[in-house]
Image (spheres, rainbow, N blue to C red):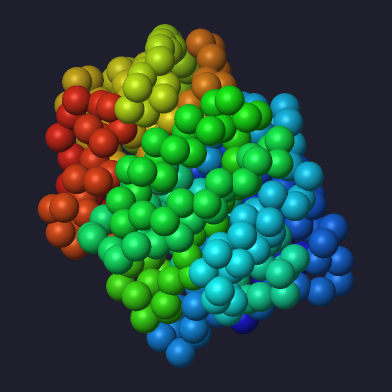
């Protein structure tokens, strides 16, 4: 990719919604803001390259439900970016999405455009995750990194730490008392460091996934258009259960009876769809991407919006190879990391 144009925004947003895997927040408002900001122009998209210089990762933390009700003003992410630049004395040369899944994908593009910087064709997850310490940047030890959060009420918090759990603790506490969500920026990180700690090609993957969804007339078309995708089930929702969870923030379980086979498919969820079983046998889990879509409209279904009687399809897309490279990486985004007591299910060919 060389750039993201205004005409690409709808497909890009559709793709980031799919890669949200049931979480990551609704993309519509941010996509509309990005479309308007780009006008007839675009934002440059560049590959990860050591010569790129200093890169800042940007994203959103907190309740996506509150985010829908209390939408951003448009200044939070650029202000967070400016805060880490002031604190470190280093200018950012590019912006990368903390996660490509959900609202953060288009929000990162909007931030890059506002700052006059290119967007890196990468992210730190390859999908959506609920916690800061699950970003690929923090899986292995880092020297002290600077991160800034700007809450919806305007509070600015800058933290210097080598432990992402500190960010998670401080920011979660702050946003719970200051509007329910915050924008954040992490860095600047040297591009040569980022290159070994990121998922490459994320912007391009989201755009291609969105185009495939737009061109699809049904579930079968969608699966053929999404590289490596497979269908686990298509049918009516029999049961939905939800409760709170201190690790994953929410915990849910949805059961679907497959219309073709009669099998009962259960999908377990944290903030995202995390683990899938067919008649009690595990068939998929994180870091693979479990995606639930409306069987007719093909729109992604968030974990909190599935209802008994809905006709849905459960798809599995390959997870980012980066997470499968070592046991430590895989464990960081395993089902147990989302509060689900289950082992990782190895990926299978579609």
Say which residue appears at 76% left-offset and 50% top-offset.
74
Give the side of residue 350 with respect to residue 186, left or right: left
Q: Is residue 234 in view from this perspective?
A: no
Q: Position of residue 203 (x, y in %)?
A: 54, 65
Say which residue appears at 50% left-offset and 85% top-offset.
52
Q: How many marks?
A: 0
Q: Is residue 46 in view from this perspective?
A: yes
Compare residues 214 and 200 and report the one nearer the observer. 200
Q: Quadrant of residue 138?
A: bottom left
Looking at the figure, which quarter contains the N terminus? bottom right
Q: Is residue 206 above or below residue 197?
A: above
Give the side of residue 94 with respect to residue 254, left or right: right
Q: Is residue 15 above or below residue 190?
A: above
Say which residue appears at 73% left-offset and 31% top-offset.
70
Q: Position of residue 199 (x, y in %)?
A: 38, 64
Q: Quadrant of residue 130?
A: top left
Give the side of residue 21 with respect to residue 81, left or right: left
Q: Position of residue 145 (x, y in %)?
A: 39, 62
Compare residues 263 and 98 and report the one nearer the observer. 98
Say which residue appears at 30% left-offset and 66% top-offset.
143
Q: Is residue 301 above or below residue 324?
A: above
């Amino acid at each position: 990719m060389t750039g993201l144009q205004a005409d690409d925004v709808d497909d890009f947003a559709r793709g980031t919604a799919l890669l949200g895997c049931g979480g990551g927040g609704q993309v519509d408002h941010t996509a509309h803001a990005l479309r308007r900001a780009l006008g007839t122009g675009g934002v440059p998209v560049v590959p990860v390259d050591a010569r790129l210089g200093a890169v800042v990762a940007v994203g959103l933390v907190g309740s996506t439900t509150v985010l829908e009700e209390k939408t951003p003003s448009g200044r939070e992410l650029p202000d967070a970016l400016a805060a880490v630049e002031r604190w470190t004395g280093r200018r950012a040369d590019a912006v990368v999405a903390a996660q490509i899944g959900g609202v953060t994908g288009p929000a990162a593009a909007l931030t890059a455009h506002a700052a006059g910087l290119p967007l890196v064709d990468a992210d730190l997850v390859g999908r959506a995750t609920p916690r800061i310490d699950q970003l690929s940047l923090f899986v292995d030890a880092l020297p002290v990194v600077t991160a800034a959060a700007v809450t919806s009420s305007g509070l600015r918090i800058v933290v210097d730490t080598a432990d992402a759990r500190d960010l998670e603790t401080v920011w979660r506490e702050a946003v719970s008392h200051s509007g329910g969500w915050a924008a954040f920026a992490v860095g600047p990180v040297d591009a040569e460091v980022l290159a070994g700690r990121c998922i490459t090609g994320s912007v391009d993957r989201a755009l291609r996934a969105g185009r495939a969804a737009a061109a699809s007339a049904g579930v079968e078309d969608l699966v053929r258009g999404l590289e490596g995708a497979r269908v686990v089930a298509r049918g009516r929702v029999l049961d939905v259960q939800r409760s709170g969870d201190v690790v994953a923030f929410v915990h849910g379980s949805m059961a679907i009876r497959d219309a073709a086979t009669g099998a009962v498919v259960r999908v377990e969820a944290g903030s995202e769809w995390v683990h899938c079983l067919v008649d009690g046998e595990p068939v998929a889990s994180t870091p693979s991407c479990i995606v639930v879509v409306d069987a007719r409209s093909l729109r992604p279904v968030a974990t909190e919006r599935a209802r008994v009687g809905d006709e849905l399809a459960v798809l599995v897309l390959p997870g980012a190879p980066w997470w499968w490279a070592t046991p430590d990486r895989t464990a960081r985004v395993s089902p147990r990391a989302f509060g689900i007591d289950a082992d990782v299910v190895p990926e299978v060919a579609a």
